[in-house]
């Protein structure tokens, strides 16, 4: 082959390579949009409930997607993309909102213990009273109560009760065993109930002295 | 099964997530026998229902979907989003934060002092004069190095920065080749409030934690004291430092250039001489 042809071929080859890369890039973008974008509602709602406002939720979701796109090569096709995206967002959330936080996913037992000690002192529920607690409660009070829970418990309550995720999915999102999902959810709901009871008491829906209520021993849980 | 064991499975019973039918049966048997656990179960069910009834799933705002899709496209086209490069700038900003406030106070005081001096005394010290000229730039440099303000162009690709600058600036700036330093970004906004003219280019060079900021503007737009201008037009390179920032001012036939850096005065001088 003459040198001139060789150069010509090389140039052609180079052009083809370049074009292929463009196609690959387009393919990447398409795949990303097809696979990752549909989970935005799930991510946005979780972000909204964790941050408590639209602006921060939008920022968090946006950051999550940008990171996901940049690290798209690290995602293994066929694995749980929703969990992958969730973990990216959870890390972003921790970096942003809990600078001095403990390890992600780890429960601060001190925090929980303190919480339980307050629950222990004033038990709050008998079956006759439950109607009063639940029926007079407003949306913002549920949200406020939710915001008072430690992050680990809030997370599972949001995922299970607001977002309707299965225990298996939640276990996958948080890298914890299903048994832990079960118990965190049970405790989380109980803590939330305690907060709702406080609201009800403040508003005067519930009267009476603590001794009238059945004492529920938290040690049982 | 006792109360304690039962409680571990209450949430699963509420959510219909019981996988093991034997356990499920045992839990149900216990609940039917134990009033406390039954109450607990009913309350948990009610709690879940209350959350579901009161806290609804929110629709995703359209602008969020659009901005995510747009940002993906931008990333795709090789223009890294701010997020990308911001992380590169952040680590070095930390030590700066500690001096930022006192520095701001010092600069403001200095500026005030200069103003007072210039009003009451006709004869102005050359050093202070120059400090006044560069203080606006130093503030700009500070806010960028601390991540408080964002340069319009940020990229790990120097060619991209060059192209962007060339397409946006109203004059052709000089792209100094500074050994070991890379161009990481640029801004076109004029930090001089008094000139009010967007006719300058600020190139940001970086090497690890070291930053050099090269400000350039056409000589005709440069609003500076005649004494300083004269020195520059003679070909003099003025080196000095204010607190931790060193700077250099020089000129070409039609451009006025100013370098601001977090290097020492001597180091900056050495590097700039190598770059010529």
Image (cartoon, grey):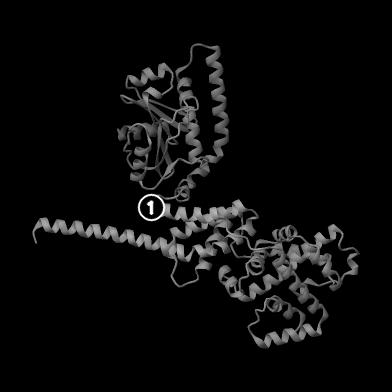
- Whether residue A123 is visible here, answered yes or no, is no
Q: In which quarter of the image is residue B99?
A: top right
Q: Residue at x 69, y 67 (%)?
A: B52
Q: Is residue B122 left or right of residue A180?
A: left
- In the rendered view, tell whether residue A33 sits above or below residue B87: below
Q: Is residue A220 left or right of residue A46?
A: right
- In the rendered view, tell whether residue B13 sits above or below residue B105: below
Q: Which residue is drawn at 44% across and 69% down?
A: A76
Q: In which quarter of the image is residue B62?
A: bottom right
Task: Classify the position of the C terminus of chain A by image quarter.
Answer: bottom right
Q: Position of residue A12 (x, y in %)?
A: 20, 58
Q: Position of residue A118 (x, y in %)?
A: 79, 63
Q: Where is residue A55 in the image (x, y as percent from the top left)?
A: 60, 51
Q: Residues within 10 Å of mark 1 (few under 14, many from 20)?
A: few
In the structure shown, which secondary structural element does the residue marked by tag 1 occupy? loop
Q: Which residue is drawn at 56% across and 32% down?
A: B104
Q: Which chain carries label 1?
A: B
Residue that mark 1 sits on: B77
In the foreground, A154 or A108: A154
């Amino acid at each position: 082959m003459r040198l001139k042809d060789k150069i010509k071929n090389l140039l052609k080859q180079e052009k083809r390579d370049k074009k292929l890369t463009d196609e690959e890039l387009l393919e990447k973008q398409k795949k990303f949009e097809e696979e990752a974008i549909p989970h935005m509602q799930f991510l946005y709602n979780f972000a909204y409930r964790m941050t408590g406002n639209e602006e921060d939720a939008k920022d968090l979701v946006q950051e999550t997607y940008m990171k996901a796109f940049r690290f798209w090569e690290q995602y293994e096709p066929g694995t749980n993309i929703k969990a992958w995206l969730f973990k990216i967002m959870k890390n972003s959330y921790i970096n942003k909102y809990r600078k001095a936080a403990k390890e992600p996913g780890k429960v601060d037992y001190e925090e929980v213990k303190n919480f339980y000690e307050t629950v222990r002192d004033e038990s709050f529920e008998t079956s006759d009273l439950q109607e009063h607690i639940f029926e007079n409660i407003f949306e913002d009070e549920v949200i406020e109560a939710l915001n008072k829970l430690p992050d680990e418990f809030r997370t599972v309550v949001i995922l299970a009760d607001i977002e309707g995720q299965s225990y298996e999915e939640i276990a996958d999102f948080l890298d914890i065993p299903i048994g832990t999902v079960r118990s965190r959810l049970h405790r989380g709901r109980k803590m939330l109930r305690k907060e709702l009871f406080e609201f009800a008491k403040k508003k005067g829906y519930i009267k009476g002295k603590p001794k009238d209520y059945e004492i529920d021993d938290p040690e049982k849980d | 099964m006792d109360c304690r064991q039962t409680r571990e499975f209450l949430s699963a019973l509420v959510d219909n997530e019981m996988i093991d039918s034997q356990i499920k049966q045992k839990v149900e048997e216990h609940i039917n026998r134990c009033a406390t656990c039954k109450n607990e179960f009913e309350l948990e069910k009610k709690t879940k229902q209350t959350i579901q009834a009161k806290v609804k799933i929110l629709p995703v705002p359209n602008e969020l979907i659009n901005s995510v899709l747009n940002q993906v496209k931008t990333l795709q086209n090789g223009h890294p989003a701010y997020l990308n490069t911001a992380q590169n700038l952040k680590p070095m900003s930390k030590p700066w934060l500690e001096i930022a406030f006192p520095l701001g106070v010092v600069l403001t005081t200095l500026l005030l002092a200069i103003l007072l001096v210039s009003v009451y005394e006709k004869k102005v010290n050359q050093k202070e004069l120059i400090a006044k000229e560069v203080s606006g730039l130093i503030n700009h440099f500070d806010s960028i190095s601390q991540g408080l303000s964002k340069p319009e162009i940020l990229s790990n690709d120097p060619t991209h920065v060059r192209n962007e600058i060339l397409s946006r600036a109203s004059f052709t700036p000089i792209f100094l080749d500074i050994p070991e330093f890379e161009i990481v970004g640029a801004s076109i906004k004029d930090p001089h409030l008094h000139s009010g003219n967007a006719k300058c280019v600020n190139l940001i060079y970086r090497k690890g934690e070291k930053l050099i900021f090269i400000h350039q503007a056409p000589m005709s737009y440069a609003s500076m004291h005649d004494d300083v201008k004269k020195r520059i037009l003679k070909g003099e390179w003025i080196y000095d430092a204010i607190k931790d920032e060193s700077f250099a001012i020089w000129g070409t036939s039609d451009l006025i250039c100013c370098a601001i850096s977090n290097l020492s005065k001597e180091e900056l001088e050495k590097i700039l001489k190598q770059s010529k």
